[in-house]
Amino acid sequence: MPGMETGTASSPCNPPSVINCIWYDTCGRPRPVELDAISETLRDDPQGFVWIGLYEPDNDVLAKVQEEFGLHDLAIEDTRKAHQRPKVETYGDSLFIVMRTAQVLDERIRYGETHAFLGARYLVTVRHGASLSYAPVRARLEREPAPLALGPSFCLYSVLDAIVDDYLPITDSFRDTLDTLEKDIFAESYRRRTVVRLYELKRDLNKMRLAVAPLQDALAQLQRNPAQLLHDEARLYLRDVQDHAARVNDAIDTLREMLGTALSVNLSLVTLAQGETVKRLGAWAALLAAPTLITSWYGMNFTHMPELAGRFAYPLLIGVVGAACVVLYRLFKRSGWL
Amino acid sequence: MPGMETGTASSPCNPPSVINCIWYDTCGRPRPVELDAISETLRDDPQGFVWIGLYEPDNDVLAKVQEEFGLHDLAIEDTRKAHQRPKVETYGDSLFIVMRTAQVLDERIRYGETHAFLGARYLVTVRHGASLSYAPVRARLEREPAPLALGPSFCLYSVLDAIVDDYLPITDSFRDTLDTLEKDIFAESYRRRTVVRLYELKRDLNKMRLAVAPLQDALAQLQRNPAQLLHDEARLYLRDVQDHAARVNDAIDTLREMLGTALSVNLSLVTLAQGETVKRLGAWAALLAAPTLITSWYGMNFTHMPELAGRFAYPLLIGVVGAACVVLYRLFKRSGWL
Amino acid sequence: MPGMETGTASSPCNPPSVINCIWYDTCGRPRPVELDAISETLRDDPQGFVWIGLYEPDNDVLAKVQEEFGLHDLAIEDTRKAHQRPKVETYGDSLFIVMRTAQVLDERIRYGETHAFLGARYLVTVRHGASLSYAPVRARLEREPAPLALGPSFCLYSVLDAIVDDYLPITDSFRDTLDTLEKDIFAESYRRRTVVRLYELKRDLNKMRLAVAPLQDALAQLQRNPAQLLHDEARLYLRDVQDHAARVNDAIDTLREMLGTALSVNLSLVTLAQGETVKRLGAWAALLAAPTLITSWYGMNFTHMPELAGRFAYPLLIGVVGAACVVLYRLFKRSGWL
Amino acid sequence: MPGMETGTASSPCNPPSVINCIWYDTCGRPRPVELDAISETLRDDPQGFVWIGLYEPDNDVLAKVQEEFGLHDLAIEDTRKAHQRPKVETYGDSLFIVMRTAQVLDERIRYGETHAFLGARYLVTVRHGASLSYAPVRARLEREPAPLALGPSFCLYSVLDAIVDDYLPITDSFRDTLDTLEKDIFAESYRRRTVVRLYELKRDLNKMRLAVAPLQDALAQLQRNPAQLLHDEARLYLRDVQDHAARVNDAIDTLREMLGTALSVNLSLVTLAQGETVKRLGAWAALLAAPTLITSWYGMNFTHMPELAGRFAYPLLIGVVGAACVVLYRLFKRSGWL
Amino acid sequence: MPGMETGTASSPCNPPSVINCIWYDTCGRPRPVELDAISETLRDDPQGFVWIGLYEPDNDVLAKVQEEFGLHDLAIEDTRKAHQRPKVETYGDSLFIVMRTAQVLDERIRYGETHAFLGARYLVTVRHGASLSYAPVRARLEREPAPLALGPSFCLYSVLDAIVDDYLPITDSFRDTLDTLEKDIFAESYRRRTVVRLYELKRDLNKMRLAVAPLQDALAQLQRNPAQLLHDEARLYLRDVQDHAARVNDAIDTLREMLGTALSVNLSLVTLAQGETVKRLGAWAALLAAPTLITSWYGMNFTHMPELAGRFAYPLLIGVVGAACVVLYRLFKRSGWL
């Protein structure tokens, strides 16, 4: 089952869709808390923040989270339905961020979604569908807790950074696929399979682009967001994530364009090869038509065909036909028809 | 007859094109009113608002509505003529919104229009052509009347939301059509029908895009509209509708692009298959040309053709011709010509 | 002769290129004036305005108009030369507007130009080339003179509205042409004429676009123009004209795109049909090659061909050849080659 | 030698690359001055300005000009090297303008560059490569000296106007070439030359676009330039030049698009014609295959072929073969194969 | 080994990845310093600045540099990893600039990266991968030290200028390649190699564009950067570099477009040539079919074929067949089939 992590075990009895619910104090020290106890913890400790990690939560858990942090109905509704475009929305004093995640499982690209609610003292990350757990991200932060002191916005950066980094192996695999297809296109033999796979690659690229292109805008928007929620240092780091997303986007756009060129180059080469075949067929037909005409000629039944009776007429004919074939063959060979 | 709803029956005697004419007080309680009595109601009750639903109204009804709310000539003119682009216009203290609606009826996409006049204390929705009644929208609001207290702008949101949600099944059906056509394209046999349907799909997509693309701009404009008419909460919800419209737009753009690729992939595959046919024809022709030349040869009437008289000449010839055919067949098979 | 209208006859003796020269008082009552008397009229009546309609005026008339209203040299120069892009220019306290007009005459689209000078108390419209007279526009305004009280900017709106409305039948005719061509493309037979007409339609669309695309920008610019010349009410109406222009533009863009698709669909269908022909030719060739080989075979002159002498050899051969043909025919039919 | 003009002869002994060096007083009266005497003239006469026209000046002349007006190193460097993009740069209190010029010489388009330095009291125009002399521009201004009183910015306008006007005959010639090529495309016979010339036209258009597209931006920038150097009246005139440049740009873009369409239409027509040829070949082959099969049939050597011996067998056969040919011919004719 | 320069030898014992570490006083006099001694030098001499040139530095050197100038973690991280998009980032009081370098080595284009850290009193340039040393740049500045007085931002300009100038020979080589390919395309014979190389050129162009397109934006951003770090004079020079980058970009875009046209022109010409071949084949086949039918005819074994017995039947036949061939040949020649 995806998303079941045990790194920083959530010892308090939370529902199974609550993967993690950890309190970080100002020094970044983690402490698991119960979902129900969050309000009190926030009240008791005026400095730290809580990071809750959910995986496909049911309505009860979402309702509880909404109540604890006073989240907006629309954001909760979006999270419940999933299937959103990457975006950043401001609801009062909290931000709602939607990102598409992508990873390769069993040689197929699987898409998921991660929604995040960012408040001054909380971060709620909600994963849907194919999406790696953010436990490693969390673990890395806990090992080097200095940035945790910057508050939840730095945790958000870490999650976004992990999401965008997950795109890179996919674009690399796209590039490998195109490289393989290029070799097929430039090979001597043409296969339907090559064209079909070019089409499929185009479809995959378009799907990927639907995830990445709006993400770039969303990240730019997030970075420029006037909300006080984002630590200045976190903004610098978000700029870096945006840069990575731009690189993924560049790669996809370039691949899409090369793919279009590959398709038309393939058509050109197929047409070229077809022309070659027609030319060669014609040459062979002409080569065979000459002796056929000659043999047909001497099959005529005229009473007076003096050459038929000659003693060496037949061997002579054999010689003539053979010579004609050799001459024609050389002629065609020289003019590039054979 | 479309648009005849009886949910919240308009008991007062209104013209038939007035589908609904309901007064909502501050608690969202509905009360049917007569079109003629609206001015008095507005005067008597300084808190509530009225929502009038019209279906292809005649000039009299439009003139009455214009008079009641002091609507602008141009907006009324647009409503009378229909066939507008999706847009949002500010006329003094009222907004005029034009949206295109789309729905599938009898397996064909039918387009309609919905015009809305939004004032501080009124909402007039006017449907034209194929357009589902907004009675279910109204009924849902009346069941959970809390948002009705936010005034007519929230009702407008509900209508817009319903319109955009109606697009989704259509783009889904477009996608299904493309999937089917893809299967046809990649099948072994090529059919004219496939190309014709690709063209028709392109036409449908373009028509749909004419409805959706300006809608996205109109919604963005509506949301940023400085008018006090729009409740802040309604703006948040409009952002959500705009997001849905953006998703519909993305889907259409991607489909359009895939369709272009499908057309050129189809051309490539057809050319490829044609080249195969030419190659195979050539090979069979060459295979038959050899025995034909031989038989033609021995049809010659030379007096002295010693091989013709031999006792086993004929069976030998049969063997030679057979062997030649087998050798050629294998040769062509190996080089991929057959 | 185009532009000779007699509706509101210009009784004062003006040059023939002065189609109309009418004074409107604050109640919108028209009164023909002489071109030379305009300055005095403007001085005497501090409220009304004058609307002059010119058709391809000579330099004398233009010079006179320039002098009367103090128009800028550059604008007069543009008007003299015609062949301008649609644009709006501000010269001090007057606006200079250039629009392209289009109308169908003798089944061909003819383009013209209308230039307008708008001042606080005057409107000069100058028509060039194929361009309907604005007399009907003027007549309609004079019948319902209320808007005339808004000043010359409303007259300008009326002229622009008439120009843009004239585009609609042309785009409709383009659409009809494309519909006809689509039928030709999807018909079984392919004709050169279809491709040629697709090309011509593309050329017509491009020409039309050169008229409409900058017009849209010019109208937007006009509407946002800070000059006091434009009555607020007129701005609202200009927005409506801009909307119509946007619709014309949308229609042209969609047609252009469909036309590109139609061209490539046509190529696909032609290639497909060609492949069919090649396949069918090959099948018939193969069908005929078999009996030809057999008859050639029994034309050989071997001394010992026992089957030639048999009593029923010939009828048997007829049967075999017939059977071979039937078998091959069925085989080809089943595999779709015939 | 290009650029050697004698209209307003530069009597003072200036280097040969100094085509003109004229002082204009406030009334626009010209007076040739020596390059070395400019500083003094500027000092002595606090009202007029100088316009220097250079053609491919050497470093000494450029150094002198730089020293006289205190021009910036970078601008001088650009002028020395030429091969710049059209642009407008502000250096302190002077403007540096780079334009591409184009003209047809010996049926080939030749490109040149004109650089201009504009100061409050000077204009230096530097021509490079193929570029008509600006002597006629200067002569026209001197004939009607009123605008010269507006200062050097009006002279700059006159030069820019002349440059942009020189583009128009070139785009016209492009259009003529396309018209000719269209005729070739739609002719019955296809020639390689047509495709090659379409390609060359595309190359020419792209080269032209590299000159015109940035020029449009540069002119817009120049017109909006906040520097006091540009007289308000000159700005109005620059707007006009920008408009002409926009028209040239429109023409090029339209031609580029039509050219792309022409290429694909050509491909369609070639494919169509090829399909026709294949169809016709097939029909003729079938027409000849029938009598060949019959004659081959009666060449068989069966002992018992009763029809061979009949008295009227041969005339009958002639009739049958003739009839078969006529029937097939009609059949093919009717189904459009011949 | 690339990057090992000895011009201004770094006599102090620095790690090998420190190519240069030079102190420039206000007069631009160079003095090599040790990396460890930079802080003191900066403290002691409040006027000059230091320019450090690194080549693929290890973590220790980077850490030292970071410590000396207080550089941001993210920038150091980017420099460590390389493989960045061209960009300009502001970190507090320092700028971080990433550029892609390109040069031709062994007939292949090799890409590298140069990162630069610009502070008020330091410039650190870090080269990665294929990248020419900036020693010549430095040497030129030291020969004419006037600009060095403008501070490190002018050194940065010199480096950027060198990078962009290195692009020009590459776009020139692209243009040469396209010229060669054009000749191949328009040659009579078609080769697969031409299409393959067009594809490879497209791939190279796309790769180059990924380096140049964001660079243009980055340079524009750098030039508008509000930081005090950039001397006003340096900004003017950066504008010049941006202009060069724009020219490189223009060249690449034009090449990309011509390449697309070249591909489709090639397809057109191949199809055209193929059509010619088919036509010619058909004509020859028809030319041979006539005598073959005649000879087949007189091979028939009818008892009564009077013409067979005639004394001059055979010579007559020879004449008839010869005449038929000549007539057909002329016919085909005239109608352009041969």
Image (tube, coloured by chain):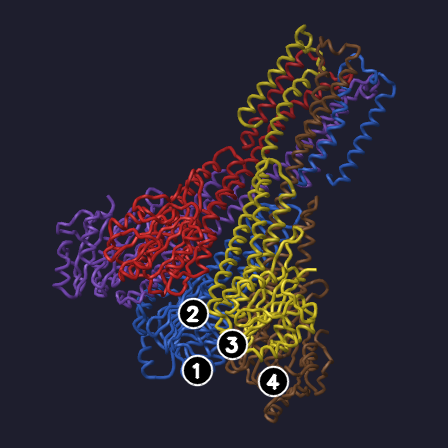
Chain colours: A red, B yellow, C brown, D blue, E purple
Dot 3 crowding, Cα within 10 Å, few <14, some 14–19, many 20+ = some
For the N terminus of chain D, the quadrant is bottom left
Mark whose residue sits in front, 2 or 3: 3
Dot 2 crowding, Cα within 10 Å, few <14, some 14–19, many 20+ = some
Tell whether label 4 touches label 3 (CB within 8 Å).
no
Q: Count up the numbered dots.
A: 4
Q: Quadrant of residue E301?
A: top right
Q: Secondary structure at mark 4?
A: helix
N-term-proximal mark, 1 vs 2: 1
Residue named by callout 3:
C225
Tell whether label 2 touches label 1 (CB within 8 Å).
no
Q: Amino acid at mark 1?
A: Ala
Q: Which mark is residue D221?
A: 2
Residue named by callout 4:
C64
Tell whether label 3 touches label 2 (CB within 8 Å).
no
Residue named by callout 1:
D149
